[in-house]
Image (cartoon, grey):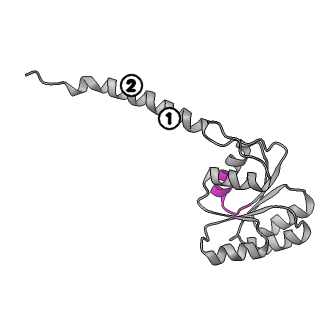
Amino acid sequence: MDKVNYYSLLPLFFGFFAANFTTLAAQHLLNQMVQDWSDKKILVAEDEFIGKKYLEKILSFQNAKVYFANNGEEAVEAVRNEDFDMILMDLKMPVKNGFDATREIKQMRPKIPVIAQTALAFPADKARAEESGCDDFIIKPIIRNELIAKISRLFEQPLLEFN
């Protein structure tokens, strides 16, 4: 009986794997939710650099205009000086936390949607966010499609998906 040279099968295996991986990657990209928020201005109140970059990537891919505040005080000041369509509010920030900032913002602009984004995942934290005026709540690490769905719901826009 002849020995099978398994090394001769490697190009076949890797060719099959590469072709299937490329197809899966393309399908994944096609299944991503894509919205047209080119007319939307979103304020991201976030003190962590990585969190800012991650949210900026998600929102700019939807063509939203993204603005940043490093803490709750800056968020309140930004809302005083600019009209935003949405706020993503980190709850745990220096200078002024997201709970207090949201209360102040809702006094100035009660109809602006605010989504609390936080690693504080306890029911009491969610209740406290609701009491401060947050319209929705998302737990970090943020899942891209979950965030887009929440924002779309608050913008009262249907989700656009490529299938």
Observer-nearest of 111 and 7? 111
**Residue 22 x, y percent position in the rendering:** 49, 30
Give yes or no for contact between labels 1 and 2 (Cβ–Cβ under 8 Å). Answer: no
- What's the residue at 7%, 22% (across, down)? 1
For disc 2, the marked residue is 15
Which label was assigned to residue 24? 1
Q: Amino acid at mark 1?
A: Leu
Decide whether residue 51 is among the magenta residues: yes
**Residue 121 x, y percent position in the rendering:** 60, 70
Callout 2: few (<14), some (14-19), or many (20+) C-alpha neighbours within 10 Å? Answer: few
Bounds of the magenta segment: 45-55
- What's the residue at 62%, 75% (across, down)? 123
**Residue 53 x, y percent position in the rendering:** 67, 51
Q: Helix or strand or loop: what does disc 2 sit on?
A: helix
Which label was assigned to residue 141? none
Question: Quadrant location of the C terminus?
Answer: top right
- What's the residue at 56%, 38% (across, down)? 28
